[in-house]
Amino acid sequence: MASYIIRGGCSPCPLAIYKEIDMTTIAEFMTSDHKACDYKFADAETAALAGDWSKAETAFNTFRDDMARHFRMEEDVLFPTLTAAGGPSGPVHIMLMEHAQIKELLKQMGAAVEHKNAQQYSGLSETILMVMQQHNLKEEQILYPIMDQILAAQRETLLGQIQSV
Ligand SMILES: [Fe+2]
Ligand SMILES: [Fe+2]
């Protein structure tokens, strides 16, 4: 009678599972999207300050659209999910107020592009850069890490949702 040794192989192998998991955090994904928006901002500013209005218009529209998409990721998906899970509503409220401020500045920048007004664009550009930098830093250092902690179990689903916004 033959005897069989069933080897305790790895099915499923823990290492394979580990490799299949997408290790991107919300903080990493959203921080890299901030950087992508910053590059678009710089493209628009360079063109506007050089007086190349045709290029500036295209670059500004790209920047504005990318910012709008980034805000939708936060306003439609991340922020409501965070507060629904018991996350801090105060900081989220402040972020939303800052979004409104940035959206207003974007509207004014759009008008400056339309009127080909480099001086106006330059002033607004300086203001929005300062507001964006402070806003992004607060999200990157405080809010996104809180999301990664509180929403850890939903992270993969959330990353899928924000990428399809
Ligand atoms: Fe934001
Ligand atoms: Fe953000």
Image (cartoon, rainbow, N blue to C red):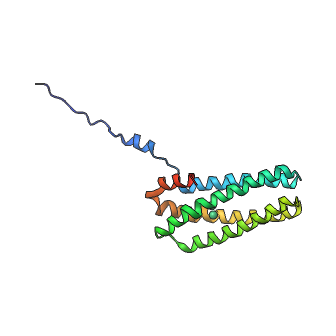
Q: How many marks?
A: 0
Residue 30 in the image, given as x and y percentages of width and height = 60, 56
In the image, what residue occupies the spot 89% across and 53% down? 51
In the image, what residue occupies the spot 45% across and 57% down? 154
Residue 133 in the image, given as x and y percentages of width and height = 70, 62
Depth order, front residue of 5/148 = 148
Q: Residue furthest left?
A: 1
Quadrant where the C terminus sits is bottom right
Q: In the picture provided, is 137 more to the left or to the right than 129?
A: left
Depth order, front residue of 29/141 = 29
* Position above or below: 90 against 118: below
Residue 161 in sight from this viewpoint: yes
Q: Which residue lies furthest to the bottom in this view?
A: 90
Residue 43 in sight from this viewpoint: no
In the image, what residue occupies the spot 68% across and 66% down? 134
Q: In the picture provided, is 24 more to the left or to the right than 37?
A: left
Depth order, front residue of 48/29 = 48
Residue 2 in the image, given as x and y percentages of width and height = 13, 25
Quadrant where the N terminus sits is top left
* Position above or below: 146 against 10: below
Quadrant assignment, res 118:
bottom right
